[in-house]
Every structure is written in C-alpha cells, then in structure tokens.
Amino acid sequence: MHKDEASRLFASLGDPNRVKIVKMLYHNETLSVEALTQIMDLSSLELKSHLSLLCEVGLVKKQNEEYCCNKELLDTLLAFIPTRCGCCS
C-alpha cells in the first residue's frame, strides 16, 4: 500500500459514525441498511451517505441489498503504520 492510498483511506475514517459502521461490518458477515439504521443513531439518508463514501474508497462492499467490510483492505490499512517501507529508515 502506498502512503497516498493509506492517507485517503484513513481520511475516510475521519468520522466517528464511519468508524462505527466499519467496525460493525467487520464483526458481522453482512448487514442491511435497515439493520445498520437500528444500530446507528442516524437517519437512513445520513447512513446511506456514509456507506456511499466507504464503498467509494473500497472499505465497504455492497452485496445485493447488504453491506460487508472489505476485511483484507482494512487489515492492510491497519498494518500500514507498523510496516517498514522505503519512505522511512
């Protein structure tokens, strides 16, 4: 993962509601908008806006009418900081 991609992904998690959505999806196989609306203290419109942004950056995927976490990408992002690369010595 390049630092630019990591920065974009970290920025997408810059809202506590999006962090909670990703965390809920990480620990559940899939959740519908209805299920997430019951969990979150958000309107359906606000939730869909957050889900759209998370899907756009690839941290969340939509499967039929349900959403799931892209665990592989999230795990790579979370491992980015402690992993050495060419930009630091």
Image: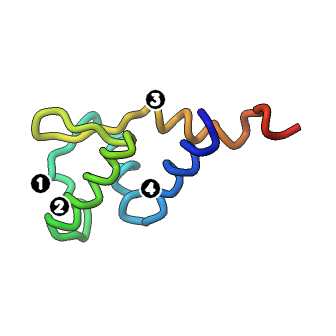
Q: For the residues marked 3 and 4, what is the alpha-carbon distance in whole angstroms?
A: 16 Å
Name the residue carrying label 4.
12
Left or right: where 13 falls relative to 41: right
User: Three-letter amino acid code at disc 3?
Assistant: Glu
Q: Nearer the viewer, mark 3 or mark 1?
A: 3
Where in the figure is residue 64, as x and y percent of width and height?
Answer: 11, 34
| Above-or-below relation of 63 to 18 | above
> What's the residue at 52%, 34% (across, down)?
75
User: How many angstroms separate mark 3 from mark 1 (CA)?
Assistant: 25 Å
The percent position of residue 8, horizontal first and vertical second, equals 51, 50
Q: Which mark is residue 51?
A: none
Q: Which residue is mark 1?
A: 34
Q: Please give the residue where the numbered disc 3 appears in the rendered image.
A: 72
Tag 3, which secondary structure?
A: helix
Q: Amino acid at mark 1?
A: Glu
Q: Earlier in the sequence, mark 3 or mark 4?
A: 4
- Mark 4: few/some/many CA within 10 Å (<14, 14-19, 20+): some
Look at discs 3 and 4 and give the one toward the viewer: 4
Residue assigned mark 2:
38
For disc 1, the neighbor class at 10 Å (few under 14, some 14 to 19, many from 20) is: few
Mark 2 is on which residue type?
Answer: Gln
| Dot 2 crowding, Cα within 10 Å, few <14, some 14–19, many 20+ | few
Q: Residues within 10 Å of mark 3 (few under 14, many from 20)?
A: few
